[in-house]
Amino acid sequence: MSYIINKWVRLRIILVGLGLGLLLLMVGGRFFQLQVILGPELREQANREVQKLCPVLPVRGHILDRRGTELAISTRVYSVVAHPRKITDPARLSQELAPILGINPGELKSLLGSGETFVWVKRHLTPEKEEAFRTWQESKDKQTRAADGDGRRDEDWIYLLPEAKRYYPQQALAGHVLGFCNIDGKGLEGLEFQFEDELYGKPKKVQMMVDARGRCVVTEEKAWDPEVMGHNVVLTLDRTIQYIAEKELMRGVEKWKAAGGLVMAVRPQTGEILAMAQVPTMDPNRFAFYPEEVRRNRLLTHAMEPGSSFKIFVAAAALDAQAVRPTDQFHCENGVWHLTAKEVIHDVHSYGSLTVQGIIQKSSNIGAAKLANKVGSARLHDYLKAFGFGSRTGIQFPGENAGLLKNLRLARSPLDRATCAFGQGVSVTPLQLTMALAAMGNEGVLMEPRLVKRIENAKGETVEEFRPRPLRRVLSVSTARQMLAIMETVTQQGGTAVGAAPPGFTAAGKTGTAQKLVGRAYSHSKFNAVFIGMVPADNPVLAISVIVDEPKGAIYGGVVAAPIFKEVAAQALRVMGYYPPTPNVPVLASLLPAAAHAQSKPEIKETPSLAAAEGPLTIMPDLQGKTIRQVLDVLHRAGIRCRLEGSGLAVSQEPAPGTPINPGDICSVKFQSRL
Amino acid sequence: MPPRSDPDAASFQDNVLLVSALALMSLGLTMVFISSHVMAQSQYHDPYFFTKRQALYALAGLAAMFATRLIDYRRYQAIVYPVLFLSLVTLLLVFVPGIGTKVRGAARWLRLGPITLQPSEFAKLAVVLFMAYSLARKQDKMKYFSIGFMPHMVVTGIFIALIAKEPDFGTAMTLAALVFVMLLVGGVRLAYIMGAFFSVAGLATMMVLRDPKKFNRILSFLDPWKYGQDVGYQLKQSLLAIGSGGLFGLGPGQSRAKLFYLPDAHTDFILAIFSEELGFIGVLLILALFIILVYRGILLSLRAPDAFGSYLALGLTLLISLQAGINMGVVTGLFPTKGLSLPFLSYGGSSLMATLAAVGILLNISSQIKRPKIAPVQRPGIAAAK
């Protein structure tokens, strides 16, 4: 039946072919119309659809200590955001998402159904929640891609947005100095508030390609864009000294069951603040858990009566004004001085005649009052003002308290004038007190306190530098030196703070025990124990003030605060590179016969081997869960050679824990990364 | 006529047809990767998910093509009805839960262990086979209503109805158009065809009006910009993608529509991505390849050694090029949106295998063309050059 097709069929086949050709040509023409004629217009429209001006949130600059240790950094976290107006079925979404995000389903539903254009669903997800959310997104992708591909789904309108979150890696260290930020990265307290403009960074808008789900196509950049990074603030604080100060203060506060305490360390020559410690501490990572009082930097917001420590300023004024000579004797009324019929000043111990040095060393109230009288209220007031009391120091920190210095010229009673001499009726901040003290260690020149060394941009280039700034000369060089000599006696035999000098150094200081004001009266049970001092006494490199709030058991500055001073000073000096002078060659030992001298030599040799005998391990330790570095540390110290496999944390070892081992043995440890 | 009567026949085939088909297939493989990798990465965490599969399908398709190239096309005449019955069964099986799989509400696939098949793709081949066989056999009686028209309408009508029921409206309409064209060529009276056409058109209109989803598609087709946010979204995105391509395109791999903007970017709308990346120039290349295919197919249909071969060649050419033309029309908004793949280019194993098998059959027909015996002395050079 193989007929050959007839000519009419042939014609019709040719017509069909022409028809198909026409169809394809028509399509080609349509492509020409769309691509060549309308092309630019359509491309423009597609650009509008695809490219979005994405705001790039600014990233807050870091806060670094003087050595570059990071005290406050910005980390990347993700937040869940949504566009409720676009969401059609909030009930279903919230049912699914509530357990994933750990939110109440009802609340989530009302949030997603609110019809707002943009809402934050959950800020700063934990890594686990972020992972759970991503898993949810992926499972949704799979489900819905298969179901209906037209348009956008509800799920596309709820997504993760990267954000910068403030993190304080040193936790509570200097927390009250650093301050903290709110969830939007706006500084609320402390340096974060003070340097808000510098730290904040520059938000910018970037033309980005966005996929149909509204996600930026270039998604995971590794590092922050330096253009949006704020400046870094480099502090004068030394992380190590700060740590020492906080640790020793905490120990002191615990020992005396005190309500709290403050320690401050300053370099007298530059006014740089090396440490600003306070107890109780505040971890800015969780600032909301702390009461307002604890969050504040009380070293400069809290004015208190300085107590006897104030006497050195009165004495310095008296000497500098040449109202008295160091050798002048003052009769201290055997402890009780009746100014008028009603007004009496007491000393803790009764003294007869004392020199200026004696008044300071013994801390005689009556003597100090007499010194103040010698200077005269007007001059004394001028001196105290010159020391910086009663006015703000100008430190770059919010909320500084000016303290209170009554105009002594207007003081009505002689008692008011007199009490000022031993630190009653005036209030000063620990910062003012420390800076005034430091002025004596800086040959009489008062420096402006500096907390910020410089501001640098994200690349590390200095933008602004804060140089040491002398405010004014308060004392002559000779008076300053005289005062140091007088204050040195306080830490020596017969002083109120014997043994306050760290070993190998001399210290110049002054104790104080201030009655706290409760209501309008002085408390007889609540005191501030104060010690302010400088090391070394002859050429101070460190001015430290220690204040312990309401110590129990002992109240005196020399007992409570001075040991803290000693510990902080001893350790801080080492950090700063000052070591106690090497002990003198034992004079007596060199006089001994040669045999005895030789005998001591093997002893010296023996010591390291003794120490070494203690070190090595005799049995295999359990290395499970340790990092490579820790394992190497342990094994190298024991002299064991080891073979390492993998990375992460140790999961298995050969030989097993508890097996006896000898130095030189080989062991192998397997590591596995947890993820 | 015995097969391979001509000793030269076995070695002769239409290589132009073969080359353009292979070129389209290779372009298709590349385009499947380019258009799907973003989505594959996001959905399956493997950018090559679809590409790997399409490569396997292409291998299977090539095998099918070689097989059909070697089988004498006349032998199909003996198995037309079994093949027709088999594909009818597979079309019915689609609706059987467990064997048939529903994707996006459409029951178009059969799941056989690890592989899924789309019976409608093979049913199209079967229908073409049946039509060619029937037209060639009834040649003279085609003008009679009860012989030339009614039986074809009933048989193909069942197929088209089943495919439309899946629903796969695009394939059904394409198949209907193919049947009409073949009947017309076969000699059925134009009046019958027009009558049938209008009744089918009326039926289709009714279905469209009753089904809001399809009605929306018509609406979106009429004004994709107005409905660009919902029903016209796909078409609007497709037009934007095509327009973005311009004359020379955005460059390979630079498509933006594939970033989830354009649904079905690697299947039905693959040409939009292609034209976005390679521009009008690239589209011309694809069009040229299809036009070569049409030209060679029509030529084959005219030169085939017998009527069955002619109608078979015509049907297969129509199968490929009509679908291609309609798909291109859909992508550019000339026709209402339908689920219709672009032969050779779109992702899909059944479609690629059926298409390549069709190419194989065409090649076999081309190998059996009765050519004048090689007699250069008798023939002048002018004729040889033609």
Image (cartoon, rainbow, N blue to C red):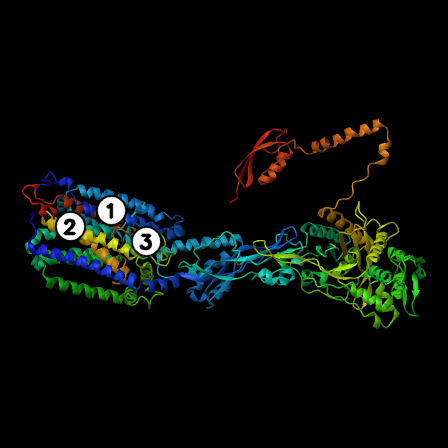
Secondary structure beneath label 3: loop
Q: Nearer the viewer, residue A77 or A91?
A: A77
* Mark nearer the N terminus (1 vs 3): 1
Residue A258, percent from left and from top? 76, 56
A287 in relation to B84, above or below: below
Q: Are marks 2 and 3 in contact (CB under 8 Å)?
A: no
Residue B169: tell me if it is visible.
no
Relative to B340, A426 lies left or right: right
Residue that carries the numbered disc 2 in the rendered image: B313
Q: CA distance from mark 2 to mark 1?
A: 18 Å
Q: CA distance from mark 1 to mark 3?
A: 19 Å
Q: Residues within 10 Å of mark 2 (few under 14, many from 20)?
A: many
Residue that carries the numbered disc 3 in the rendered image: B266
Q: Residues within 10 Å of mark 3 (few under 14, many from 20)?
A: many
Residue B292, percent from left and from top? 19, 51
Q: Amino acid at mark 1?
A: Leu
A300 in relation to A582, above or below: below
Q: Chain of mark 2?
A: B
Q: Amino acid at mark 2?
A: Ala
Asked if marks 1 and 3 fall on the same chain, the answer is: yes
Residue that carries the numbered disc 1 in the rendered image: B22
